[in-house]
Image: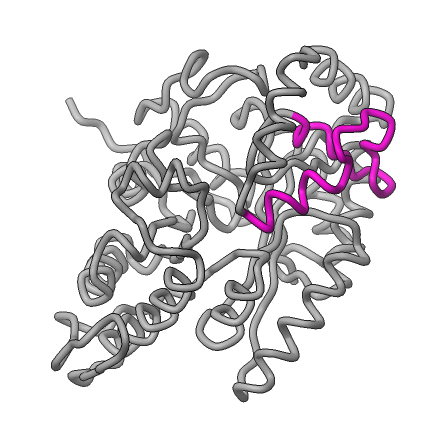
Amino acid sequence: MIEMNWFMPTGGDSRDVLADAGTSRAPSVAYLSQIAQACEQLGFDAVLTPCGTGCEDAWISTAALLAVTERLKFLVAFRPALLTPTLAAQMASTYQRVSNGRLLVNIVTGAEQTELARFGITEDKATRYARTAEFVKIMRGAWSGRPFTFTGDFFEVTDATTRDVPDPVPPIYFGGASEEAENVAAETVDLYLAWGETPDAIRERIERVRAKAGAFGRTMRFGVRFHVIARKTSEEAWAVADSILASMSPESIAAAREDFLRTQSVGQRRQFDLHGGDLSKLEIHPNVWAGIGLVRGGVGTALVGSYEEVADRIEEYHALGNDAFIMSGYPHLEEAYWFGEGVMPILRRRGLLPELQSGPTKVFSFR
């Protein structure tokens, strides 16, 4: 069974891939509530809320949405370098009680140096990932229900604990394409996320990280992150992709290319290498289009096609070992409906998604 998730645009939303954050739709509680309620009604499991200076804070933003939803879970991203592991454990434990168990945790270690500098993070990549491994161990220890004491290279804690064991203990999601990231994932996390690439590339990564986890005596889950453009016909979907490509000026593509060539992020470089800036090589696999990655950082690939074609691709990537998918589209409210009403019913008929739960979404009045 697939875990199907959506993306919460806490940096703002727009029909224009190139729009500056928030220039079209500000990430107000009212707008984010529309997306959250749509996702709950459509049957998504959770929404990923990102972290960074271009976004609203993920913890606070998602907490504001708890009152207008009942079942939807929130995959909250945060940087382990910015708080202590015991404090993170306490925040997560409190969140689980407040939300009735609807928190998933996404730990983000990697970033461009300019973004890290805004937070005063000066450690090199190897150090940041080594610190993350200790962070996760302490956070899990604080959730164990017994006082947890730990001494490592970065942290020393005595009797770390929380008021109560969170129920359930939040699963830990984590991504990163570097060797350091894969090693941390294999040793400590529950689900390893990759940005969308070709099936062969995703298969190779899953096999490698699974083997590394096995060396620690562990098993883990895997997930993949894509944008999506799904329509009734393939022609309609590709017309949308073509319009997105047409909106990109040669100058914006060239500027992004220079940024991607300088990046220290292995994952970001892998996204660029899918096309290398060549507009004739954007369909890297049937219905897998790398056009968004011409100008935008992060995941740059989209599943593009008819509802049936997009469902086929999801089934293909699921067969590789991906249990979880995190999808997104521009704008996120409308694209959630295109995908949720067009593709997800097909996946349900194929037995890949659970049946849609009935019942109204809770809406509170603050009058």
Q: What residue span does the magenta drawing correspond to?
A: 265-294
Q: In the figure, is residue 127 to the left or right of 181?
A: left
Q: Nearer the viewer, residue 207 or 337?
A: 207
Find residue 59 and report its horizontal and vertical position in percent. 28, 45
Q: Give the residue displayed 22% in from the left and 56% down from the top.
A: 83
Residue 329, picture quadrant: top right
Q: How many marks?
A: 0
Give the answer, above or below, for where 107 lies relative to 121.
Answer: below
Find residue 152 and report its horizontal and vertical position in percent. 26, 79
Find residue 267 and report its horizontal and vertical position in percent. 60, 49
Q: Nearer the viewer, residue 34 or 260?
A: 260
Q: Give the residue displayed 58% in from the left and 68% down from the top.
A: 221
Give the answer, above or below, for where 131 lies relative to 43.
Answer: below
Give the answer, above or below, for where 145 lies relative to 280.
Answer: below
Find residue 361 and report its horizontal and vertical position in percent. 40, 38
Q: Give the residue displayed 25% in from the left and 70% down from the top.
A: 154
Is residue 155 rendered magenta in the image? Answer: no
How are the colours assigned in the image?
A: one colour
Q: Quadrant of the C terminus?
A: top left
Q: Give the residue displayed 83% in from the left and 40% down from the top.
A: 284
Q: Nearer the viewer, residue 272 or 327?
A: 272
Is residue 272 rendered magenta in the image? Answer: yes
Give the answer, above or below, for where 21 lies relative to 251.
Answer: below
